[in-house]
Image (spheres, coloured by chain):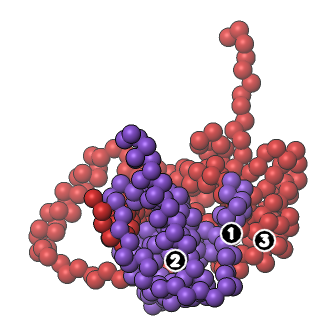
Chain colours: A purple, B red
Amino acid sequence: MLDRPVLQGLFRYGFSLTHDEAAACDLLQDALEISLRKIPDNADAAMRYVKSIMRNRFIDQYRRDQRHPTVSFDDHDKQPVVIDPRVLEDMVIAEHEVESIMAVLEPLERELLFLWAVEGCTAQEIADQTESPRGTVLSRIHRLRQKILRQQALAGNAAEGGAS
Amino acid sequence: MNRPLKQAVRQHFEPRALSTAQLERLEALMSVNAPGLTTGRPIAKPWIGWPAAAAIAALLAVIMLLAPGPVDEIPMTDRIAMEVARNHIKLKPLDVETDNMDGIRRYFTDLEFAPVKSQLLASSNLELLGGRYCSIQSVPAAQLRVSAPDKHNLKTLYQSEYRKDVFGPLPVLENGGVPVAVNVKGITVRIWVEKGLLFALTEAVELEPIEHGK
């Protein structure tokens, strides 16, 4: 059904949403408990099914969590966007910046990075997996790039300030 | 040192992995509920002869006899109580909020049993708050949250299909059985079987009055 590499992949996907290993494990277990009766026999379909349950469940729980009332999961941008989906490909990042950037990203931004970098998904594939319009995914990619650049600039200013 | 973003993100996620214990728990969850399904791993061919296998089996038997307290020797009621208490303490968000069993039954359609009211709790005036999917010892279960009439005491009531092959013998209410009470993590967990379902209810541990001057 779901072998260990698939379970590990789902766990990492859960970690991209939760940014917490214990919460990612709980999320995966919750999704398996819900989906076992309906899980498809085909391994790829089963993985996609469990992943979609993890995502929906995480978003439900996140919305209910009063500690984070300001995050929107409904940013279906209406404005037309002309964005090259490869804008992330040419970005470089310092080794020590990764953790701090991951910590400031919203769950859906980390998810987007995970799907793009780890699973190698295209913008269209991310749109299909997250059931979002492709334009929304491209907007998110654009905003994600801006956010990472801002974070890098902040880190650079802090380093210069600390050095002076 | 600067690296491409894609590589850096991959290296951020790659070390994250479920532990062996976590993997085994998830595999148990899948195997209990779909015993005919394999995990996709190829079946290994025997790599040793029968005499060597017999010698290893004998050695393992001796080790098992000498080893103190393997997990299987922990009574099933204790294992259920530990799991129930752990989840009760977490108090995870409810999947469905409802104050009646009809609402519960309408929501829990993916279970292979229908959640029911317990006769044992009929006179306790517990107020139903809602529920969420969960499992006990890898068997799918409904985790219901109830509160005492004073509203200050949240309790968790588990209901699961009573799988004797998994849970072993437990007191059956209809046969005159009395619920087993296990104290764990500061919580009393009462466990019984009723209407073909396993029930587990958390309660605050009753404190013995302290007698001064002794």
Q: CA distance from mark 3 to mark 2?
A: 41 Å
Residue B92: image location, x then y, percent: 66, 57
**Label 1 vs label 2, nearer the camera:** 2
- Residue at 11 percent of width and 68 percent of height: B52
Q: Which residue is mark 1?
A: A72
Q: Chain of mark 1?
A: A
Residue type indicated by callout 3: Ile
Q: Which residue is mark 2?
A: A141
**Number of numbered labels in the structure image:** 3
Residue A71 located left or right of residue A7: right
Q: Is residue B175 visible?
A: no
- Residue at 39 percent of width and 39 percent of height: A164
Query: Closer to the camera, A93 or B46?
Result: A93
Q: Which residue is mark 3?
A: B104
Looking at the rendered structure, the secondary structure element under dot 2 is helix
Quadrant in the picture for residue B183: top right
Q: Is residue B103 above or below residue B190?
A: below
Q: Chain of mark 3?
A: B
Q: Chain of mark 2?
A: A
Residue B53 located left or right of residue B135: left
Looking at the rendered structure, the secondary structure element under dot 3 is helix
**Label 3 vs label 1, nearer the camera:** 1
